[in-house]
């Protein structure tokens, strides 16, 4: 993908475009040949507007070479309509949620009117409605002659869109198949090189007693009686489902002290807290694993072992406050083995690891805090099937040791496969609770979209 987009130069092989060999020394050359790439890691400039990002260095100009602001705005609005986005072209990228940024990145690529459009995990931040609109636009552009290379770990998307599918493993092409020739099971086997049975694992020890409770007032008044409540038991994996914008991440960040508020309180082992800072939550045994490992989770330029101990540095300091490099490296080596992080050295910068291995480093960081409650937000976003299975194994292992896990996920199969209990959130409220036995994709979606009205919480959440 990087070679095709002109980001990297090949040291072997060739690219044939319209019957002719082509060589790109930079991304601009690839763009001039009609190749556009939407990378999983977005390339938007946070301090610029939507319009300035979409038409970066390609703004329409007037007779004197000045930017034609009105034409720029009109052209941007025309593109925004493709995804039903009712936002101002002048709005800054930094003020948009992750899902909107993802769509702006896609519109930026569409705006050059490409012959070939490469999409790398384009739905990783999108909700169901936005995914449907994306697929509708893919099919519309395909009908006009645009070709697509669609890279995804979400196999149902491949089967919804693709005519052919190529499987890559360890940098090699395992094979290319007509989509009618394969199914999900055979694809997974080709991707990981072995058969994955029961990828989500099973509960190995019974769930313990309830030890963690959360209350949130839905309005600012301290006398307001409108509350959100839920509880968590030792060793339980509690799934939290809902559409993007339903308030799942916001609630988790309030619980963990990242966005402190007097409206949200927790009770842990009988003691009440309202955490004002993540360090306070960590000290009392509550850890939060962010959904955005690149921007908010990892120090990409630093080593694996440095990231591994980042939240727990005091543990590796002597009485004078000096850190023990030897102990930090030793802990890093231990974590690489325990979390099966594929690397040649613990000194390797985390930014050079694959997405799956970066996610394992992020998990090792927060497990290293020895939490009693571990909140994982989109724990397998942008990782391959093999890495997913490893992360599920680790989460099962932590739950079996008595850690209470709150798992926020947009992947319903993940929610259904891992959760002992499922809460569904809509408009910053819990609207349904399902036991593992009765939870289905259908009833979760119906509750999340408001088709099913609020269901009895059975004492677990309100």
Image: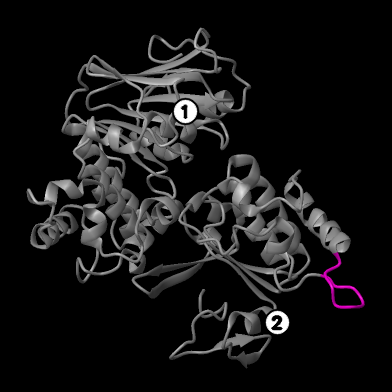
Position in image of residue 155 (x %, y %): 48, 53
Q: At x 70% / y 82%, what residue is drawn?
A: 32
Element carrying mark 2: helix
Q: Is residue 8 left or right of residue 401?
A: right
What segment carries the magenta color? 60-68
Q: Residues within 10 Å of mark 1 (few under 14, many from 20)?
A: some
Asked if one can make out residue 212 in the rendered structure from this viewpoint, the answer is yes
Please tell me whether residue 56 is drawn above or below residue 283 in the rendered image.
Answer: below
- Residue 32, label in figure: 2
Q: Position of residue 263 (x, y in %)?
A: 46, 20
Q: Which mark is residue 140?
A: none
Q: Residues within 10 Å of mark 2 (few under 14, many from 20)?
A: few
Residue that numbered label 1 is attached to = 440
Which residue: 40% across, 52% down?
A: 293
First-in-chain label (2 vs 1): 2
- From the viewer's perspective, is the residue at label 2 or at label 1 nearer? 2
Residue 357, given in percent of the width and then of the height, sits at 31, 59
Q: Horizontally, is 355 left or right of 454 in the view?
A: left
Q: Nearer the viewer, residue 360 or 288?
A: 288
Q: Secondary structure at mark 1?
A: loop
Residue 70 image-quadrant placement: bottom right
In the image, residue 109 sits, relative to residue 6, either above or below, namely: above
Task: Judge whether residue 273 is colored magenta.
Answer: no
Q: Residue furthest front?
A: 320
The reply, left or right, for residue 234 in relation to residue 75 is left
Task: Give the Cα separation between the discs numbered 2 and 1.
Answer: 47 Å
Q: Position of residue 353 (x, y in %)?
A: 33, 66
Secondary structure of the magenta portion, mostly?
loop
């Amino acid at each position: 993908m990087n070679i095709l987009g002109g980001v990297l130069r090949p040291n072997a092989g060739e690219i044939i475009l319209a019957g002719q060999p082509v060589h790109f020394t930079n991304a601009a050359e690839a763009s001039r040949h009609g190749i556009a790439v939407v990378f999983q890691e977005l390339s938007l400039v946070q301090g610029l507007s939507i319009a300035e990002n979409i038409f970066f260095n390609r703004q329409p100009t007037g007779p004197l070479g000045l930017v034609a602001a009105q034409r720029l705005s009109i052209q941007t609005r025309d593109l925004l309509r493709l995804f039903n986005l009712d936002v101002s072209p002048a709005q800054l990228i930094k003020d948009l949620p992750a899902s909107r940024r993802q769509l702006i990145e896609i519109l930026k690529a569409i705006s050059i009117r490409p012959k070939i459009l490469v999409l790398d995990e384009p739905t990783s931040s999108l909700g169901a409605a936005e995914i449907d609109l994306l697929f509708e636009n893919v099919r519309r552009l395909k009908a006009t002659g645009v070709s697509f290379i669609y890279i995804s770990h979400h196999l149902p998307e491949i089967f919804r869109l693709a005519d052919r599918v190529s499987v890559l493993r360890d940098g090699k092409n395992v094979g290319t198949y007509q989509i009618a020739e394969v199914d999900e099971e055979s694809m997974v086997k080709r991707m990981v090189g072995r058969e994955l049975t029961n990828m989500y694992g099973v509960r190995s020890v019974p769930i313990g007693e309830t030890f963690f409770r959360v209350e949130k007032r839905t309005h600012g008044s301290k006398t307001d009686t409108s509350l959100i409540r839920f509880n968590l038991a030792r060793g339980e994996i509690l799934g939290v489902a809902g559409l993007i914008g339903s308030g799942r991440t916001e609630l988790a960040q309030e619980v963990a002290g990242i966005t402190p508020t007097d409206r949200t309180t927790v009770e842990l082992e009988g003691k009440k807290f309202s955490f004002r800072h993540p360090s306070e939550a960590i000290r009392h045994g509550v850890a939060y694993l962010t959904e955005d490992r690149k921007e908010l989770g990892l120090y990409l330029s630093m080593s694996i072992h440095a990231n591994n101990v980042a939240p727990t540095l005091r543990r590796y300091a002597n009485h004078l406050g000096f850190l023990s490099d030897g102990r930090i490296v030793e802990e890093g080596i231990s974590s690489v083995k325990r979390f099966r992080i594929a690397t040649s050295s613990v000194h390797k910068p985390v930014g050079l690891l694959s997405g799956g291995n970066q996610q394992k480093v992020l998990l090792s960081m927060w497990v290293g805090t020895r939490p009693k409650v571990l909140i994982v937000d989109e724990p397998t976003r942008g990782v391959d099937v093999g890495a997913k299975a490893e992360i599920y194994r680790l989460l099962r292992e932590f739950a079996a040791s008595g850690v209470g896990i709150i798992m926020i996920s947009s992947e319903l199969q993940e929610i259904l496969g891992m959760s002992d209990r499922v809460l569904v959130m809509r408009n910053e409220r819990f609207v349904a609770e399902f036991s593992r036995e009765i939870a289905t994709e259908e009833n979760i979606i119906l509750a999340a979209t408001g088709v099913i009205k609020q269901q009895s919480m059975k004492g677990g959440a309100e």
